Amino acid sequence: MTTPDTSRLPLSLPHPAPPPRPYDGPPREEVIALRRQFLSPGLVQYYREPLLIVDGQMQYVWDETGKQYLDGFAGIVTISVGHCHPEIVERVREQVGRLQHTTTIYLHPTIGQLAQKMAAHMPTGSGLDVSYFTNSGSEANEIAILASREHTGNVDVVSLRNSYHGGTQGAMALTAHGNWKFKSSPSHNVKNATPGYCYRCPYGLEYPSCDVRCARDIEELIRYETTGEVACFIGEPIQGVGGVVTPPPEYFQIVYDIVRRHGGLCIADEVQTGFGRTGEHFWGFENWGVTPDLVTMAKGIANGAPLGACVTRPEIAQVMANRVHFNTYGGNPISMTQGLATLEIIDKENLQENARVVGNHLRERLEELKTRHRMVGDVRGKGLMLGVELVLDKTSKTPASAATGEIMELARERGLLLGKSGLYGNVLRIKPPLCITRDDADFMADCLEETLTLVEAQS
Ligand SMILES: Cc1ncc(COP(=O)(O)O)c(C=O)c1O
């Protein structure tokens, strides 16, 4: 067993800095009171004492007291190149001062430039050249499903159990995660297949002797539950909300082949996995050696601006002209400017490579934690999309939901923000801005080492 490295204790942020400016907004109590009285009670909130964030610079954010945090969750995986990246701030400021909105009934130069750049980032020869811009990932998925149904003339859609595809009616229907489904919201014509969740294999099998039964199950599902012809399959290459579930290497090749044999198109939901986050490749699906027919994206696409897109081949995109379809803010000049700047910075600053190198290092450190800590059941993910599944013990694999919340609280005290996910809320999500350094990664691992030690001692 590896000996813990205590040389970095006591913990301190690797790049400490004062807040960029003093906070002069309303006091925290007032912010809380306004939220309680005037905002939807459905808003989810992390932490026992809600966190008020008032400033952000690259991989760091500050609260109203001036306390600095390493943002290990990147505003739920939206901040790809860094909070308030100076080039983005400058270019968006220029655009806001020039023209904020007109809608796509008129021409604007940036929308075509971003679509061209997007096409250039798709695999060579894929024909994935045509973009439909939206304001969110949910809307992008709605477009992908609509286009698939129109194109194939089929209605049934296959999504994966444990998936999350958004909060609009159609996207909620795709989502197969009880926590996120409302009783009153129907899921007509959506069938849920088995994800590649090896740590909790629903068949109790082991990879590779399982022969990837989870992927092959889709054939039975289509035969029994549909007419035998489907409109499409939609899947996240790595399930984010589901707990960073990362299927085995053959998974998507088997699934795509079955779906295509039954007349369906394949959609990769790249809302979390896109834009270099998985390190080795620009798109998550490339890690599995498949090429989808439609790719949906949002979050990291524009470093925090409300922007989503559905990218597909021209002959599939053509069906959107069957009727009139319109999105008022989709393709607006400000989001386009921010999207274009983000994409250019990811390339210019080699952030995909940084995600690979720093992500691999962090993953190694997390794997080490697994050897020392009884609560670390599984370490998953790729690049800077990592998850640590916490369990009460490695034999029973009982989800350590309360301990996960406790670790997040203790990490926050030490200046690290993390996310959590999974059906039982027992998977720590580590998805920082792609610009983090090796020192930041070490800080995260040290912080987890310390907090795990404390929590394990208490339980
Ligand atoms: C994989 C995935 N798809 C779609 C969505 C929905 O995106 P949005 O919240 O922008 O509608 C999310 C949001 O978390 C997501 O993680």
Image (cartoon, rainbow, N blue to C red):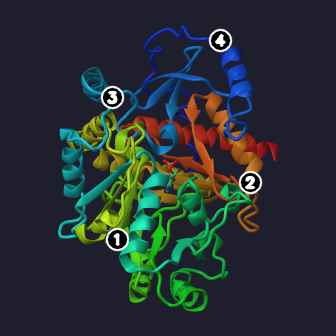
Q: Position of residue 365 (x, y in %)?
A: 49, 49
Label of residue 371 in the image: none
Q: Say what secondary structure mark 3 lies in.
A: loop
Q: Which residue is mark 3?
A: 85
Identify the residue at the far front of this view: 323
Is residue 61 among what the camera can see? Answer: yes
Q: 453 and 98: which one is in front?
A: 98
Amino acid type shown at disc 3: His
**Within 10 angstroms of label 3, few (less than 14), some, or many (20 or more) residues?**
some
Q: CA distance from mark 3 to mark 2?
A: 37 Å
Q: CA distance from mark 2 to mark 1?
A: 36 Å
Q: Position of residue 416 (x, y in %)?
A: 56, 33
Q: Secondary structure at mark 2?
A: loop
Return the x and y of residue 98 as percentages of the image width and height: 24, 23
Q: Amino acid at mark 1?
A: Pro
Asked if the residue at tag 2 contacts the one at tag 3, i.e. Cβ–Cβ closer than 8 Å, the answer is: no
Q: Which residue is mark 1?
A: 292
Residue at numbered disc 4: 27
Mark 2 residue crowding within 10 angstroms, few (<14) / some (14–19) / many (20+):
many
